[in-house]
Each structure stands twice: as C-alpha cells, then as structure tokens.
Amino acid sequence: MPVLKYIMITGLLLSLSGIARGQQYITWETLQSLDFQEKYVEEVQGNMLFPKFTSLLRSLNGKTVEVKGFVIPIDKEGKSIVLSANPYASCFFCGKAGPASVMTVKLKAPNKKYRTDNYRLFRGTLRLNATNIREFYYILENAEEVRK
C-alpha cells in the first residue's frame, strides 16, 4: 500500500475512533476530503464550485466537535475568527490551500486577544454550508477554546 494512501486511511480511522468514543475531534484531513460540484450562480454571473460533503461530514452536521488550527482574526469585536489548517502565510487567502482548509469560528464569548497564527483547539457546533457563497464551507458556532 502506498505510504500516502496508508497515512490518509490511518487519519480517517483515527478520526472515526475519536468520534466513536464521543470525543468528536475532527481533523483537517477529514474536513478537506470532499468533492466539488460546479454550478452557475446568477449573483456572480458565472460558475462556482460547491462542496459535496462525505457521509462522515454530513453525520457531524449540527454536532459538537473539536478542531485545532491556526487563528486568523477577522472581527474587531472578537466575536468570530477564521481557523485555518495552515499558518497565515500559506492559508487559503494567501497560499495554495483550498476553501475546505478554513472555517468560521463564531465564539460564545468575544475574545480580542487572539493573534494571527495562534494555534488553538476549539469546541463548538459544526454547521456545513453548501449553498451560501458568502460563508465558508464550515462554521463552528457557539464555540469556545478548549485548554488541555
């Protein structure tokens, strides 16, 4: 078995085993393992790619999950941040990563102290977005930082 395939399968199994134990930790590999469907969008008068979520991701929609990532502050009031699989210099906005490598984190309590590239673990309710072109594919609502 090729090494990359082995690593991907191992990561998926670890994600599934965490979910089976009730930990609900989800990896970026799992979040990025989706397909896309091209659709015409009148608002932009062109085609855009929309996510086709896996059955595992659909099963997590509306569930409490934990995810680690790099913080990108976006809100002066500290009500929400972007969480990225990659540091800012190579994130979706500035580097070669794709749109499934970032998520909006809507914080339960505002926090203005997060700095770019803080690596943090958050827990919240995962909401999948396959229709609103003004939002990321993933939104973590009512989220709070988990300190272990």
Image (cartoon, rainbow, N blue to C red):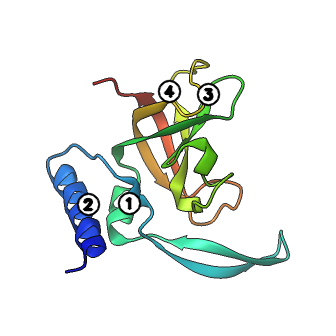
- Label 1 amino acid? Glu
Local SS, label 3: loop
Residue 114 location (% of width, % of height): 56, 24
Alpha carbon distance from label 1 to label 4: 26 Å
Looking at the image, do the residues carrying marks 3 and 2 touch, with CB atoms under 8 Å apart?
no
Which image quarter: residue 65?
Answer: top left
**Distance between mark 3 and mark 1 Cα atoms:** 26 Å
Q: Mark 1 points at which residue?
A: 29
Please give left or right for residue 56 compared with residue 81 in the image: left
Query: Which of pointers 2 and 1 lies earlier in the amino acid sequence?
Result: 2
Q: Which label's residue is closer to the chain start, 1 or 4? A: 1
Dot 1: few (<14), some (14–19), or many (≥20) neighbours within 10 Å?
some
Q: Mark 4 points at which residue?
A: 108
**Residue shown at 57% from the left, 60% from the top:** 97
Closest to the observer: 13 or 23?
Answer: 13
Q: Is the residue under label 3 in contact with that under label 4 (CB below 8 Å)? A: no
Dot 3 corresponds to which residue? Answer: 79
Determine the residue positioned at 32% across, 65% down: 56
